[in-house]
Amino acid sequence: MSCNNVVDEAGMRLAGEILKKRREAYQVQVRNARRRSIEFMFSYEEWLDFWEGDLEQRGVNGLVMARKGDVGPYSVENCYIITAQQNIAERDKDKHSEALRASWVGRECWLSNTTTHPCNKRVRSPEGQEFNSAAEAARELGLTGQAIGARCRSSRSEWAYIG
C-alpha cells in the first residue's frame, strides 16, 4: 500500500467521524427540543447551514441556538446564534419581568433576611461571640459566609456551629 493510499484512507475515516459527530449533535438538539416540548423545524441540512463555521464552537460553554424572545419553534426564521452566557442573561431578563416582580410585592422572601432562613445554623466564633448565621457573622466580621462555614466545619478551627 502506498503512502498516498494510507493518507487518503485516514482522511476518509476522519471525515466520516466528523460527519457522524455532526449528525449526533443534530439529533441531540432535536431530542432536547422535543423533551422541552418545543417544535424543531430544522432539517439536518438547514441546521448545518445555520451553524456554518460556528459548529465546532457550539455547546453548553460556547455558542447556542437561541429563539427570538425565547418563544416559538426552533426554525430558520426564529433562531439566531449567541453565547450561552448571553442566552442565560436574555432568558433571565425576560423571566423576571416587571409583572413577575410585581407579583412578589409584599411577600416575605427568605433571601431578603438571611439571618432568619430556616436552614441557617447559629455560629460561635473563637472569641465566644454568637451569631444567628454564617452570613451574619460574615457581615459583622468582614469575611465571606463561605469562609465562616469552612471554619465551622474544620476540626482545626475554634469556630463552631451551635444548636
Image (cartoon, grey):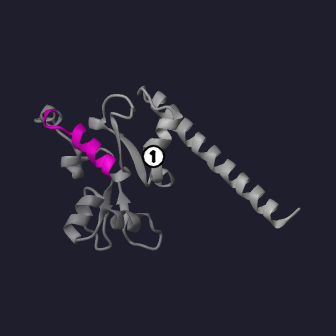
Q: Residue at x 18, y 48 (%)?
A: 112
Residue 27 appears anywhere in the view: yes
Dominant SS in magenta = helix
- Foreground of the two, 59 or 124: 59
Magenta residue check for 137: no
User: In the rendered image of this protein, does residue 81 appear above or below residue 126?
Assistant: above
* Image label count: 1
Give, as a single range, the part of the protein colored magenta. 86-99
Q: Residue at x 38, y 50 (%)?
A: 84
Q: What's under tag 1, amino acid-wise?
A: Trp
Query: In the image, is 20 to the left or to the right of 123?
Result: right
Magenta residue check for 87: yes
Q: Residue at x 44, y 54 (%)?
A: 61
Quickly name the residue at label 1.
51
Q: Residue at x 25, y 67 (%)?
A: 129
Picture coordinates of residue 139 (x, y %)? 21, 65
